[in-house]
């Protein structure tokens, strides 16, 4: 198809504003799938995506559309994830497009991620079409949302289209506007090949399927390609487009969005944001914007049954084929045995990996407390990075410690400003900005440590704002902190899987919380069990599990008191010996309980 009849676009929105539902309506109108095979959230291929109502992996689909002028257009929709953990995938998907539909919920209005995604689209020079969705709901406030579009986003509210993705109302007008307002792609088919990889997925039969947008040149089966950053060369076996299923084509030209299959065995050979060119006729330079995705959250995964280690290893290898951003290495713990130390893009990424291991591979696993990567200056002048409490060098060797900070952008109704500010201050947040968007909504900007956001910040934010506050963040670098290693001792012995790196001022509270949780979960033994939180040699918290006691004096029916005392002393000595040689079995539920906050 000629470039004038191609439109490459994406849909950007906050979580749960109807992105996947609108994509469903487009697919139904294009009739690229039989009605009997259609199901809701067609582009969300994982069960987890369907259940949570979120998009984790970006997808693409090519749809034919006959416009009112009688011409047939090819609409290439690149679906984007909505969650902050996958913001790099969003930026690469946006850079593959020429225009964007900015979807705003008519009941909720402009939210934090609507803004951040709009700025991304503007940075890439995309044509923006504002769209107000969910106009069929009784709580829709169209006039208010139009004001927000003008005031918060700086877009023309009169150009906003009104639709209901659920009922299909206004979708026809939106398709016409899309054809009229989004520009056709540029690029020359005769130039050297220059194509952007915006995603990839693994097929067990055909290897890695590379999703790309061709900016310059042409790519055909049989061509030898060069992947710019990795330097790897591959022979193209097939090219094609996404029509829910993979539809093979003779070639992909400048302006097309599609896929190539080139016998690539591992997904880590292909990195999102990289440039593909021909090996024998290279383009002058790679496309801008590529960066290595670096994990920010670290946790160890162990099998609950030590005999399942080999199954867990096989499952991690298979998961890595489909998730290039998952990083792991072998790890071991005295308490939990052999496992893996993993790096994740964020907490949602961690939860998704955990659920996939449990569902797709039927494994019972346990995760240690999530941690971030700290930068530590040693007394000898060296600087190291530590993401595992076991590798912390100790107080005497440390000259200074630095932790990663984020800039948090929170939008909340004015009624909950006090609650949100209190929560952010509790999490060591420093207010940078406070901006009243209108009489009902406030934008708060805080700088706070990433470690404080890991455990329960998002849940608490939704709780204190009754679900109305929205949250977005970006990494801003490292700041100095007072870092200590908190050890948890059970019966005087440290349990390595429960150790954590924490802020010194909150270490005692965290230790008390973990000890209280463990006291509820560890069963009573024949001897008294002390549970202690320690920083170095200083005990900062203690709980005690009392012993199971047998009434040894029950057989005494009177007589001298010394007889009873003798029996009690004998029991006391026995308990002491038992405590020295007895082992305390810490159940798996205790490890899970220790990770929860007191509010959970």
Image: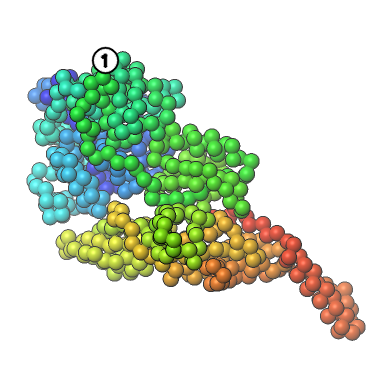
Q: Secondary structure at mark 1?
A: loop
Task: Report the residue marked by disc 1.
Answer: 250
Residue 338 is left or right of residue 36, and the answer is: right
Nearer the observer, 93 or 486: 486
- x 27%, y 31%: residue: 275
The answer to whether residue 34 shows anywhere in this view is no
Residue reaching furthest right? Answer: 559
| Mark 1 Cα shell of 10 Å, populated few (<14), some (14-19), many (≥20) | few
Task: Work out which quarter of the rendered image holds the N terminus and state it.
Answer: top left
- x 12%, y 24%: residue: 4
Image quarter for residue 411?
Answer: bottom left
332 is higher (above) or lower (below) than 454: above
- x 12%, y 55%: residue: 151
Image quarter for residue 78?
Answer: top left
Nearer the observer, 286 or 469: 286
- x 41%, y 51%: residue: 297
The answer to whether residue 322 shows anywhere in this view is yes
Nearer the observer, 14 or 586: 586
Image quarter for residue 286?
Answer: top left
405 is higher (above) or lower (below) than 180: below
Position in image of residue 321 (x %, y %): 44, 33
For the rendered model, the colour scheme is rainbow
Position in image of residue 495 (x %, y %): 59, 59
Nearer the observer, 543 or 33: 543
- Give the tally of numbered discs: 1
Position in image of residue 75 (x %, y %): 20, 28
Position in image of residue 592 (x %, y %): 54, 55
Residue 143 is left or right of residue 211, and the answer is: left
Residue reaching furthest front? Answer: 380
């Amino acid at each position: 198809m000629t470039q004038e009849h191609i439109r490459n676009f994406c849909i950007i929105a906050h979580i749960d504003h109807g992105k996947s539902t609108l994509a469903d309506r487009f697919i139904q109108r294009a009739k690229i799938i039989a009605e009997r095979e259609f199901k809701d959230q067609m582009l969300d291929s994982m069960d987890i995506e369907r259940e949570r109502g979120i998009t984790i992996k970006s997808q693409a689909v090519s749809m034919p559309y006959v416009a009112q002028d009688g011409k047939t257009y090819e609409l290439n929709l690149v679906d984007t994830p909505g969650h902050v953990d996958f913001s790099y995938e969003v930026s690469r998907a946006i850079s593959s497009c020429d225009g964007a539909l900015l979807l705003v919920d008519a009941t909720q209005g402009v939210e934090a991620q609507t803004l951040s995604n709009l700025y991304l689209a503007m940075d890439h020079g995309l044509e923006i079409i504002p769209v107000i969705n969910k106009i069929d709901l009784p709580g829709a406030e169209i006039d208010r949302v139009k004001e927000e579009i003008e005031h918060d986003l700086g877009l023309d509210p009169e150009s906003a289209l009104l639709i209901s993705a659920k009922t299909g109302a206004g979708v026809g007008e939106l398709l016409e506007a899309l054809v009229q307002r989004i520009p056709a792609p540029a690029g020359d088919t005769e130039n050297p090949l220059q194509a952007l990889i915006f995603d990839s997925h693994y097929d067990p039969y055909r290897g890695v399927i590379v999703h790309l947008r061709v900016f310059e040149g042409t790519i055909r089966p049989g061509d030898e390609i060069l992947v710019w950053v990795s330097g790897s060369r591959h022979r193209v076996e097939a090219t094609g487009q996404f029509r829910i299923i993979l539809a093979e084509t003779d070639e992909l030209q400048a302006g097309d969005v599609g896929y190539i299959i080139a016998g690539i065995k591992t997904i880590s050979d292909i990195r999102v944001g990289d440039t593909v060119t021909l090996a024998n006729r290279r383009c002058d330079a790679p496309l801008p914007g590529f960066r290595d995705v670096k994990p920010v959250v670290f946790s160890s995964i162990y099998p609950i049954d030590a005999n399942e280690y080999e199954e867990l290893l096989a499952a991690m290898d298979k998961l890595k084929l489909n998730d290039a951003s998952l990083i792991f290495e072998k790890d071991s713990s005295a308490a939990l045995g052999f496992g893996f130390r993993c790096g994740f893009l964020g907490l949602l990424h961690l939860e998704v990996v955990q659920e996939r291991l449990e569902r797709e591979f039927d494994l019972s696993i346990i995760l240690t407390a999530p941690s971030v990567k700290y930068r530590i200056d040693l007394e000898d002048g060296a600087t190291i990075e530590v993401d595992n409490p076991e590798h912390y060098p100790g107080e005497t060797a440390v000259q200074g410690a630095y932790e990663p900070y984020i800039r948090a952008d929170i939008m909340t109704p004015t009624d909950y400003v006090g609650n949100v500010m209190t929560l952010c201050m509790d999490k060591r947040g420093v207010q940078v900005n406070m901006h009243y968007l209108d009489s009902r909504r406030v934008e708060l900007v805080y700088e706070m440590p990433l470690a404080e956001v890991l455990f329960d910040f998002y849940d608490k934010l939704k709780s204190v704002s009754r679900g109305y506050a929205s949250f977005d963040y970006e990494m801003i670098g490292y700041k100095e902190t007072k870092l200590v290693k908190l050890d948890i001792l059970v019966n005087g012995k440290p349990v390595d899987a429960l150790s954590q790196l924490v802020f010194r001022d909150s270490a005692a509270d965290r230790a008390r919380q973990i000890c209280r949780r463990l006291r509820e979960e560890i069963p009573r033994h024949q001897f008294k069990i002390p549970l202690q939180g320690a920083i170095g040699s200083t005990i900062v918290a203690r709980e005690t599990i009392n012993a199971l006691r047998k009434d040894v004096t029950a057989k005494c029916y009177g007589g001298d008191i010394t007889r009873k005392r003798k029996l009690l002393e004998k029991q006391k000595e026995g308990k002491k010996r038992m405590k020295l040689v007895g082992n305390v079995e810490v159940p798996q539920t205790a490890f899970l309980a220790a990770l929860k906050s007191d509010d959970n």
